[in-house]
Amino acid sequence: MYDLIIIGGGPAGLTAAVYAIRKRLNVLLVSKDLGGKTNYHLALPWIDEYQVIRGLEVVNKFKRELEYLEFARHMEAVECVEKKGDNFIVQTRGGANLEARSIIVATGVKQKRLDIPGERDFIMRGLCYSALSYAPLFIDKKTIVVGDDDLALRSAAELSIVSNNVTLIRSVTDPLESPLYKKLKAADNVTVLEGYQVTEVKGDNYARSILVKTPEGTSEEFFADATFVEMGLVPNTKMVAGLVDMDETGRIKVDCGARTNVPGIFAAGDATFGLAEQVLVAVGEGAKAAISAYEYLLPKL
């Protein structure tokens, strides 16, 4: 029986685990890897490492600590979480059943991808998935955003503040009744193309262009310093579906203390509805969740 099981080895989960260990809790972190999204580094030909705020120094310190403390980690994906009286059972993909008095879900999100030729070849090498994280690097650059909904609009709007030229490529043709959409349509440095399908990513060491199919069925090539795929984010929360309250996107609802509606279950990072995609935000939320879990456990210890 563990005091606390933390599901997820990204910035929020690693932070929560180290805080819990220092609180002398019997804690186990369960994840298929350590580091989460910090394992993927954006590479651009004009960018030096120091120009990107990654939060890696903190995350890597926690990662090294968990790598050293073998008793505090179980490297396997989680299938589901079940309630057992006042406790919880965490079932892993390999068939393990791990019991704990409390749970922190810090499983993050995954980006929707285009699944087209060339995409895998240039991931994080000129092909980006978070304008929220990387837009400041594209001052006076030419950028492309691919996506249909609010995330793509937000990304294009953020890039339009710093980039010389932004092309927003939408596969649909329906206009959106939002202030951001109207702003983009009116902006001098933004081109909105609707009804266009991206078919291939091309480049050398970095992504340099994309091929698209026009509404007329012809093919065109668009060149840019970087292309942002902003098709949406899918929370990795299936293992607690039906157990805790979620919003319509599948993100876990939490209060200001990272508590869910189920006593003993907490959540942190991108799996919750907050400021997604920011490592330092996830680190803070992981610490908050660990402190809340400790307060919950204290009468039981």
Image (cartoon, grey):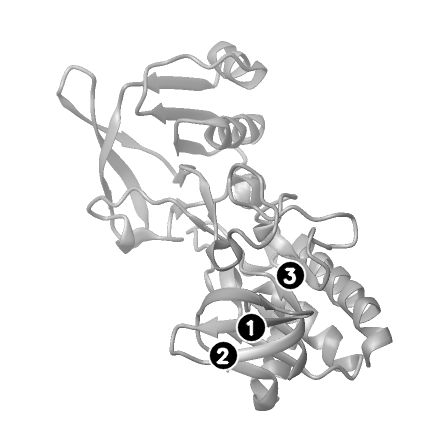
Q: Residue at x 82, y 81 (%)?
A: 301
**Residue under pointer 2:** 97
Percent position of residue 205, x then y: 29, 55
Q: Earlier in the sequence, mark 1 or mark 2?
A: 1
| Mark 3 residue crowding within 10 angstroms, few (<14) / some (14–19) / many (20+) | some
Q: Is residue 56 visible?
A: no
Name the mark nearer the viewer: 3 or 1.
Answer: 1
* Viewer-side residue, 267 vs 40: 267
Q: Is residue 18 visible?
A: yes
Percent position of residue 288, x then y: 77, 60
Q: Which mark is residue 89?
A: 1
- Circles 1 and 2, Cβ within 8 Å, touching? The answer is yes
Q: Is residue 126 left or right of residue 240?
A: left
CA gap between label 3 and label 1 equals 32 Å
* Viewer-side residue, 32 vs 95: 95
Percent position of residue 194, x then y: 32, 18
Decide: is 121 above or below 159.
below
Judged from the image, the secondary structure of the residue bearing numbered disc 3 is loop
- Circles 3 and 1, Cβ within 8 Å, touching? The answer is no
Please name the amino acid that badge 3 sits on: Gly
Please name the amino acid that badge 1 sits on: Ile
Q: Earlier in the sequence, mark 2 or mark 3?
A: 3
Please name the amino acid that badge 2 sits on: Asn
Decide: is 161 above or below 202.
above
**Residue under pointer 3:** 55
Q: Earlier in the sequence, mark 3 or mark 1?
A: 3
